[in-house]
């Protein structure tokens, strides 16, 4: 019977004013399809993609349109090193602008997180390889939202996505 050899808590690095998206896929064509989804989403979006291949050469495949975002995606994918996982780092855009496109890629099985918060990835390691068990996104709640907090939240939404309420 196979056993878990090790649990690893991996802290990822997100460049300033950027967001990271962590997911799992199933096919080497993931890089091309994610690239297409991102490049057609916005003319100003800067991004990098890294995909941990789980068979064959088992390479970290990559692409993007910004060397800084590509390097960040590769570095974070190396830290995770879980088969068929992918890391996307974006700047000059928000995950809300691209998540539907990413989730609709036929190779994508799941998205674990999309955030600008400090993030930790919980990785389990077996004799076969590594897999993502979950993520810790940001911090523990410190209280309950007040009416003033709610007004501030709605104001922020109006500023960043032109939310109307």
Image (tube, helix red, strand yellow):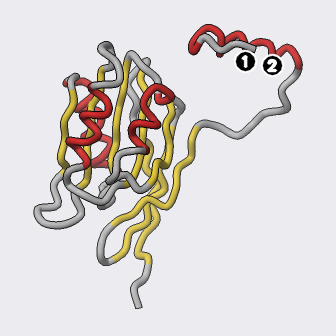
Choose top left, top right, bottom left or bottom right for residue 64. Answer: top left
Q: Residue furthest left?
A: 57
Instruction: Judge left or right: residue 113 versus residue 26.
Output: right
Q: Is residue 72 above or below residue 110?
A: above
Cα distance between the residues tagged 1 and 2: 5 Å
Q: Secondary structure at mark 2?
A: helix
Q: Residue furthest right?
A: 147
Residue 113 is labelled as: none
Residue at (34% x, 18% y) in the render: 42
Q: Is residue 63 above or below residue 8?
A: above
Choose top left, top right, bottom left or bottom right for residue 82. Answer: bottom left
Residue at (72% x, 18% y) in the render: 153
Answer few, some or many: residues within 10 Å of disc 1's Cα (few below 14, many 20 plus, some between 14 and 19). Answer: few
Residue 153 is labelled as: 1
Expressed as whole percent of the image width and height from the top left, the position of residue 62 reads 19, 41
* Marker count (numbered): 2
Which quarter of the figure is the C terminus placed in?
top right
Which quarter of the figure is the N terminus placed in?
bottom left
Q: Which residue is mark 2?
A: 150
Expressed as whole percent of the image width and height from the top left, the position of residue 4 reads 44, 76
Choose top left, top right, bottom left or bottom right for residue 66. Answer: top left
Q: Secondary structure at mark 1?
A: helix
Expressed as whole percent of the image width and height from the top left, the position of residue 51 reads 26, 48
Instruction: Judge left or right: residue 57 versus residue 18.
Output: left
Answer few, some or many: residues within 10 Å of disc 2's Cα (few below 14, many 20 plus, some between 14 and 19). Answer: few
Pick the front one: 74 or 24: 24
Pick the front one: 103 or 146: 103
Residue at (33% x, 47% y) in the render: 86
Instruction: Judge left or right: residue 138 versus residue 128.
Output: right
Tag 1–tag 2 contact (CB < 8 Å): yes
Expressed as whole percent of the image width and height from the top left, the position of residue 53 reads 22, 57
Q: Is residue 38 above or below residue 21?
A: above
């Amino acid at each position: 019977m196979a056993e878990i050899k090790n649990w690893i808590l991996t802290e990822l690095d997100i460049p300033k004013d950027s967001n990271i998206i962590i997911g799992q896929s199933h096919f080497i064509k993931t890089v091309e399809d994610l690239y297409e989804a991102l490049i057609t989403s916005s003319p100003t979006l800067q991004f990098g993609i890294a995909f941990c291949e789980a068979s064959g050469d088992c390479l970290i495949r990559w692409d993007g349109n910004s060397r800084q975002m590509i390097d960040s995606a590769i570095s974070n994918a190396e830290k995770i090193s879980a088969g068929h996982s992918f890391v996307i780092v974006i700047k000059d855009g928000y995950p809300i602008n691209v998540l539907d496109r990413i989730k609709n890629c036929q190779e994508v099985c799941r998205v674990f997180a999309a955030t600008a918060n400090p993030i930790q990835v919980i990785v389990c390691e077996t004799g076969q390889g590594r897999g993502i068990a979950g993520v810790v996104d940001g911090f523990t709640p410190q209280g309950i939202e007040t009416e003033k907090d709610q007004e501030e939240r709605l104001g922020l939404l109006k500023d960043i996505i032109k939310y109307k309420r």
